[in-house]
Image (cartoon, grey):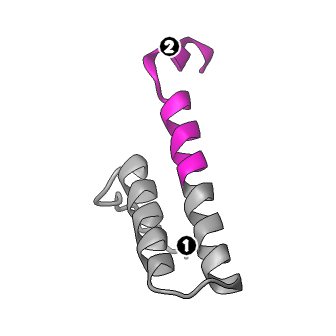
Amino acid sequence: MTKKRNRTRPALSLQERLNKFTEDARAAARNLPAGAERHALLQKARDGEAAADMERLLSSPDQQHLK
């Protein structure tokens, strides 16, 4: 017997989830003193921004003909 896969959609779009991730990482970094942990959170925020930019570029109407 095969198990049925849960196919629910996320409440927020990918763009919204990436933006929230970036905002949360920056907010957490603001509460930390300078150091490795703060640097890591800021790097994650930059990575989230880059991912959001890539997603925006790939989902733009100009790129639809490439799919």
Q: Of tags 1 and 2, which is closer to the observer?
A: 2
Residue 67, placed above or below residue 7: above
8 versus 39 height, above or below = above
Q: Main secondary structure of the magenta part?
A: helix
| Residue 49 % position (x, y) | 54, 51
Residue 35 in the image: x percent, y percent? 67, 85
Question: Can residue 4 be seen in this snapshot?
Answer: no
* Residue at 41 percent of width and 47 percent of height: 15
Of residue 11 and residue 9, the one placed in the foreground of this image is 11
Q: Residue furthest left?
A: 11
Residue closest to the far right = 36
Q: Which residue is mark 2?
A: 62
Q: In screen coordinates, is 1 left or right of 9?
A: right
Residue 47 visible at all: yes
State yes or no: residue 62 in magenta.
Answer: yes
Does the magenta-highlighted stretch encompass residue 18? no
- From mark 1 to mark 2, how far is it between C-alphas? 41 Å
The span shown in magenta is 49-67
Is 55 situated left or right of 12 in this image? right
Q: Quadrant of the N terminus?
A: bottom right
Residue 48, label in figure: none
Is residue 35 left or right of 12 when viewed as pictured?
right
Closer-to-camera residue (45/62) = 45
Residue position marked by numbered label 1 in the rendering: 2
Categorize mark 2 by other alpha carbons within 10 Å: few (<14), some (14-19), many (20+): few
**Which residue is at the front of the view, 50 or 27?**
27
Tag 1: amino acid: Thr
Q: Residue at x 41, y 55 (%)?
A: 19
Q: Residue at x 60, y 80 (%)?
A: 38
